[in-house]
Image (cartoon, rainbow, N blue to C red):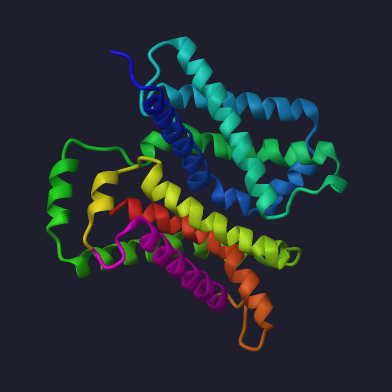
Amino acid sequence: MARPKAHEWRIELDDLMRGIAGAFLFGAPFLYTMEVWWKGNFTSPPRMMLILAMAFLALVLLNIKGGFRAQQPRSRTQILVESAEGLAIALFTATLSLTLLDILHIETGIDAIMGRLITLSLPYSIGVGIANNILLRTPDDNEADHAKKRSHPWRSTLSDAGAALLGAIVVGSSIAPTDEIPMISSSLEPTRLLLIMASSLLLSYVIVFEANFGAQRRRRSQAGLFQSPVSETVAAYLIALATAALMLWLFQVIRVGDPINQWVSYIIVLGLPCTIGGAAGRLAV
């Protein structure tokens, strides 16, 4: 019996969001590494082609047992096609990321822009390729779901909050001491900071509730105080921002007495990878 068109589109959308989520989960630390951008400025066309070839090969190997689609490819042709789709997702995600942080500029030249995109596409491609392996469902998921449904609301809330905090600390502590945060923040206008905030919230929601990682049904039915998708996403983002502020203060990137606009911009910029780390932590519980 043929599946309804709407159902097929829903599956396709889930697969695409899973690929984008995997790219961000794996590629965020590379996004905040200025050496990746600078190397892209001096990457020659032959080297760009080599990087793309390596990314495609990595996707081919990863698609044999992983990939970003829920249904595993059944033939060599499907593996090649889905690897090409994965590379396109990686390039799209890299473009979106660099544009969001205002790292791509027309005045730098098309060669430098392509170099930055293609250099970043390699780790993003790996993220797309391991999307289904980040958190695999197990046969015991249903039993775990029932057990967690019976847990106390406070316990569920604290579990998710703790997981979001730990995930944000793991990612944020590796990025906060670097020069990338001041460098990126220095060129951002208020409207772009608002866009980064909106993107952080959207990514968190997609990774946890729409990309079909882990036990989606259980996450939507938990009885915690902030367990609806929207309220949990907002609460987790506030935790990510608080963690970003703490990490920046601990590493003396921001100090008491610094201008308030500097605090705000630094925290929002670091809040993006902290939010991604927090989403990964919430998936693990």
Residue at 57% across / 22% down in the picture?
A: 84
Q: Give residue 215's quadrant in the image.
A: top left
* Residue under the image location 53 percent in, 28 percent down: 86
The N terminus, quarter of image: top left
Does the segment drawn in magenta span residue 233? Answer: yes
Q: Quadrant of the C terminus?
A: bottom left
Where's residue 132, x and y in %? Answer: 38, 34
- At a point 55% along the width and 34% down the height, the residue shown is 125
Residue 209: within the magenta? no
- 104 relative position to 206: left or right: right
Number of dots carrying numbers? 0
Looking at this view, is 15 or 248 the one in front? 15
Q: Is residue 46 above or below residue 244?
A: above
Task: Reply above or below: 251 against 48.
Answer: below
Q: Position of residue 156 (x, y in %)?
A: 23, 63
Q: Is residue 102 left or right of residue 225?
A: right
Dominant SS type (magenta):
helix
Q: What residue is shown at x 33% (from left), y 14% (from top)?
A: 2
- The residue closer to the viewer here, 117 or 234, is 234
Q: Position of residue 264 (x, y in %)?
A: 62, 74
Residue 213: image location, x then y, percent: 35, 42
Residue 45 occupies which quadrant of the picture?
Answer: top right
Residue 266 visible? The answer is: yes
Foreground residue among 190 and 118: 190
Residue 17 placement, left or right of 285: right
Q: From where the camera sits, is residue 180 visible?
A: no
Q: Which residues are magenta?
A: 224-250
In the image, taking residue 160 as reference, residue 255 lies left or right, namely right
- Looking at the picture, does residue 152 appear above or below residue 37? below
Q: Please tell me in which quadrant of the rendered image residue 135 appears.
A: top left
